[in-house]
Image (tube, rainbow, N blue to C red):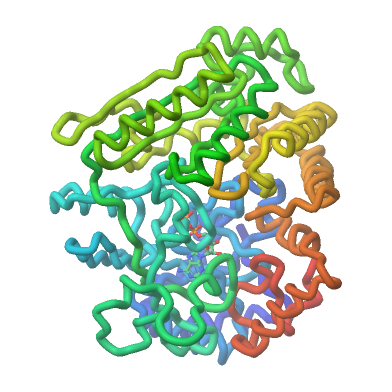
Amino acid sequence: MKQVLPPGMSAAQMDRALKAIARVVGDDWVLATDLDRDTYLDHFAVDEAAHAAAAAVAPLTAEQVVEVVKLANTHKLPLWPISRGKNFGYGGAAPRLKGSVVLDLSRMKKIEFDAANGVALVEPGVGFYDLYDYIQQNKLPYWTSVPGNSWGSVLGNALDRGVGYTTYGEHTAKLCGMEVVMPTGELLRTGMGAMKDSPTWNLYRYGFGPSWEQMFVQSNYGVVTKAGVWLMPAPEAMIGLDLEMENVDDLGWCVDIVAGMRRDGLLQQSPSIGSWLRGAAVLTSRKEWYDKPGALPDDVIAAIRKRFNIGWWSISLRLYGYASINEAAATLIQSQFARHTRQPMTITRWNQGTPLNPAPGQAAFAGVPITFPLANAAWHGGRGGHIGYSPVLPANGAAAMEQFRRTYDRYREFGMDYHGSFAMNERSITNVNQVLFNKDDKDMMGRVNGFFRALVKDASDKRYGEYRTHIDYMDLVASTYDFNNNSLRRANEAIKDALDPNGILAPGKSGIWPKRYRDQRA
Ligand code: ADP
């Protein structure tokens, strides 16, 4: 990728800025060759060049981050912070604003572990594999919670509200105590960390006065250089309850009963009810079954499901903790399901001291990092990719069925294969849909944008908003949050201008544009 520049900046100005930064991070850590720039492209994006970075810079310490951010202010250089940049489906390592310089924090890999309290204080470069290995090597009695793509960063994932499989799967909720470089270069610590050397920085979330932690999540108000992450004590036992459901309509009752279990606390983990393609896309590819364009016909779907023994929907519930409590909960859960289906649940049991089931689909429930779900990008063949469409719904079966039908019809209308799931939160559902595509299929790629926009409009007509979106659609999604003529966005941007007067940090992230670049809003 040849160098691109941010709006209003010349090549000479960029060169001066990068040279100044090289004096802080070292020449080796200013990454500005064509190959470097390729590396930071979002290979899943429909139009990769639209989000090309000018370069990347990779500091090693928080002190270096402070200096880089100060220099970015001096040179009016837009920076895009990433932790490990594996945010596939939402932009990967690529910046929202073309020509930004990626602030790559992946070299910052320190872990400090408070074994008494089960808290890891991690830097941005710590990946799920790193933390898992650290725990294993030090024989610590804790489990990580990992996402489907565990290649990423513990902190980066939590900062974009990524999720995992265990009771600690709402990763952003498990952050406690952050160290942040503000857009002006000032270093601060949130909560109890505002008191120097406080032993409760990573134990009590709020501190004194306003609590700012979520302010640094899905925002562009600071570069997080460290954060406390709470980990689940290794449980005495785990029970798995897996069910393959035969019928499309099973989604409705399943959502209703699981919503009840989440509300009353019988189930502490957030299971996700996934359509058949979630299972199939990592086991086979489309061309083995069908060679025509357009959505797959029902008889082909039936044949694939039969071959792999996959329900139209599947769900995996997990119970963690004391064996006797798990057993009682499992009995109650099974009896609730038995009222709706004769299909038995597959029950698996694990007790401390015995080996974990190494099957990749099982390991993630025990906090073992996985990457096999990434294989779904290969479903269509060619250079695969996907983007996520993820509206939040109320936790009830009728709403889920209605949303499913609407979305399913859209997939078929645009000739795409439906890949949806309904993750059951405590009071809501995150309806994560993958739009899988083949980047070498010009016709298919030509349909993606219209399809995605139709999906967002369908959701917003029902007053559902996305919880997260690809960099291409951040402005679109932000515009659907329209109460009082988008007053929240105005407040976000007023805060942005106050904290980041030069507009250097992640312009456009989550639809928040600083004054300097506000004309770039799509
Ligand atoms: P992962 O590698 O875990 O997928 P990323 O590094 O891609 O995570 O981060 C996801 C998004 O979160 C980034 O695009 C960026 O907007 C934001 N982000 C990541 N790390 C930081 C950080 N340390 N400070 C501020 N924002 C961050």
Q: Is residue 229 above or below residue 453?
A: below
Looking at the image, residue 393 sits to the left or right of residue 322; the answer is right
Looking at the image, residue 401 sits to the left or right of residue 162; the answer is right
Q: Is residue 362 above or below residue 47?
A: above
Residue shown at 32%/49% (left/top)?
144
Q: Is residue 4 visible?
A: no
Quarter that holds the N terminus: bottom right
| Residue 18 rendering spot, x and y as whole percentages | 51, 79
| Residue 17 rendering spot, x and y as whole percentages | 54, 84
Residue 96 location, quadrant:
bottom right
Q: Is residue 123 visible?
A: yes
Quarter that holds the C terminus: bottom right
Looking at the image, residue 139 sits to the left or right of residue 254; the answer is left
| Residue 258 rendering spot, x and y as whole percentages | 54, 35
Residue 431 location, quadrant:
top right
Toward the viewer: 110 or 120?
120
Residue 509 location, quadrant:
bottom right
Q: Is residue 159 above or below residue 69?
A: above
Residue shown at 69%/22% (left/top)?
249
Residue shown at 68%/45% (left/top)?
389
Toward the viewer: 54 or 124?
124
Looking at the image, residue 194 sits to the left or right of residue 218; the answer is left
| Residue 34 rendering spot, x and y as whole percentages | 55, 60
